[in-house]
């Protein structure tokens, strides 16, 4: 079996891996890069109008012959680990005859992102991962393993061909609600001694960053909710379902209503129909949930002819006036772009905003403008966050569980730190081919 990491050997995000055995080829993940060399954030705005071939010429699309819609297809399948854009963002360019294998939740999240944002990823030939179970693609036998991550329905892949086994971790952790079951299940279902482990290392170099469990985060949020005399506002990713669960727990334990903007409500409702989502906090499924309608987002969906989406949640709607009457009983989801809506809720001075995102997003222009506007309203900011990625101790546990013969760094800024895990490290460059 031959392994090529087309992108990811020295950066976080933009992952793309090729495995080849005999005449069969598969791709794992096809994401937009998050950053350039040197840890600089990638700005895609100058490239929004570029065609696929132009993106390839710019070095943004991985150079994979036979993968794209303008080429003769020679890839047997694309496997997608989870829905984050740095793993799925270039699926638009895959040849329509090439099947894309992905989880049920991942497919739905991609569709929701296409509905709500300018990032249009129109899926073509999709196949749902048979989980639990395995499937064959060409010479490859693929076994998906459900893992804990900040994206709902994330998978690692165990892949066999030609007498060799590769394990691709994708993005994972064990401090979410699936918790240690992630690695316990892998231990029970995947025999040790894999020939190669392609393991993410997002948290390498961030040892000083605190890593709370989602339950610990929920408990801290509960304290904030009980101590705050006004509203508690939450700025988090609407697609971070585990975090939504954490804040729902905090809201209900402190006697507050869980007030979602209709985008976040839609994410939870749609994922609630997927395998594993039946207990999620979405309107009509759990108590104490209300939905509010930010003007700009509501107007935009109506202009696009998608008013059927916000209209689904009017039964649970709450007005700004109603919130103003009981601010001490409200936990409200907000994000940049909603400043004007918040200015029309009287009495917010003395409220608390919980910032629950990676600190690197704090310096984005839109975020700075948003946070500045809230400060002028008398709203105090608190940071309460935990990573969607595995710290060193969890990475070590995965290595100990799988006992790989070789360890391939991927999705990391610190490939040089992989020597600490006690197995041979195969350091390669993007595009380099390694034979197992």
Image (cartoon, grey):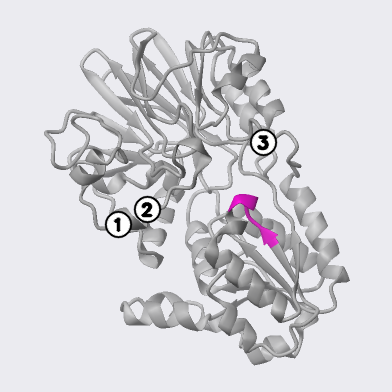
Along the line of sight, the residue nearer the viewer: 48 or 111: 48
Span shown in magenta: 355-360
How many circles with numbers are drawn on the protein? 3
- Ranked by sequence position, the earlier of labels 1 and 3 is 1
For mark 1, what is the residue? 48
* Vertical relation: 38 (above or below) 436: below
**Picture coordinates of residue 53, whole percent (x, y):** 18, 43
* Residue drawn at 60 percent across, 66 percent down: 368
Q: Is residue 86 visible?
A: yes
Instruction: Name the residue located 29 percent from the left edge and 37 percent from the top edge.
Output: 59
Mark 3 = which residue? Answer: 174
Question: For mark 2, what is the residue?
Answer: 44
- Neighbour class for label 2 at 10 Å: few (<14), some, many (≥20)? few
Q: Residue at x 50, y 57 (%)?
A: 271
Q: Which numbered dot is residue 180?
A: none
User: Circle 2 — which element?
Assistant: loop
Depth check: 354 or 133 in front? 354
Instruction: Check contact, mark 1 vs mark 2: CB within 8 A.
Output: yes
């Amino acid at each position: 079996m031959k392994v090529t990491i087309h992108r990811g050997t020295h950066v976080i995000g933009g992952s793309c891996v090729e495995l080849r055995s005999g005449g069969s080829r598969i791709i794992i993940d096809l994401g937009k890069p998050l950053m350039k060399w040197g840890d600089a954030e990638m700005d895609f705005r100058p490239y929004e109008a570029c065609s696929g071939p132009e993106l390839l010429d710019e070095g943004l699309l991985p150079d994979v012959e036979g993968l794209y819609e303008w080429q003769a297809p020679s890839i047997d399948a694309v496997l997608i680990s989870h829905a984050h854009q740095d793993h799925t963002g270039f699926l638009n360019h895959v040849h329509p005859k090439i099947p894309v294998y992905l989880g049920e939740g991942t497919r739905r999240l991609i569709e929701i992102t296409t509905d709500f944002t300018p990032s249009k990823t129109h899926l073509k030939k999709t196949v749902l991962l048979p989980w639990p179970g395995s499937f064959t693609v060409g010479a490859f036998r693929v076994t998906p393993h459900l893992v804990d991550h900040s994206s709902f329905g994330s998978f690692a892949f165990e892949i066999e061909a030609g007498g060799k086994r590769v394990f691709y971790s994708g993005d994972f952790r064990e401090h979410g609600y699936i918790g240690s079951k992630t690695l316990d299940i892998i231990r029970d279902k995947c025999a040790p001694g894999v020939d190669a482990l392609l393991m993410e290392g997002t948290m390498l170099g961030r040892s000083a960053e605190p890593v709370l469990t989602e339950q610990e985060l929920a408990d801290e949020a509960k304290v904030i909710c009980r101590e705050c005399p006004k509203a508690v506002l939450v700025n988090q990713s609407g697609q971070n379902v585990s975090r939504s669960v954490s804040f729902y727990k905090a809201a209900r334990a402190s006697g507050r209503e869980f007030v979602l903007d209709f985008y976040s409500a839609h994410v939870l409702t749609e994922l609630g129909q997927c395998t594993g989502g039946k207990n999620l906090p979405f309107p009509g499924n759990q108590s104490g949930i209300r939905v509010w309608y930010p003007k700009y987002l509501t107007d935009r969906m109506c202009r696009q002819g998608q008013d059927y989406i916000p209209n689904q949640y009017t039964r649970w709607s709450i007005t700004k006036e109603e919130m103003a009457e009981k601010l001490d009983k409200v936990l409200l989801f907000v994000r940049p772009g909603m400043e004007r809506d918040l200015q029309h809720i009287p009495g917010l001075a003395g409220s608390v905003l919980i910032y629950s995102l990676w600190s690197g997003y704090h310096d984005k222009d839109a975020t700075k403008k948003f946070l500045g506007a809230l400060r002028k309203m008398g709203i105090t900011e608190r940071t309460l966050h935990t990573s969607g990625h595995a710290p060193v101790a969890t990475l070590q546990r995965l290595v100990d569980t799988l006992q790989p013969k070789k360890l391939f760094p991927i999705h990391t800024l610190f490939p040089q730190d992989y020597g600490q895990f006690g197995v041979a490290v195969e350091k390669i460059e993007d595009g380099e081919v390694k034979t197992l």
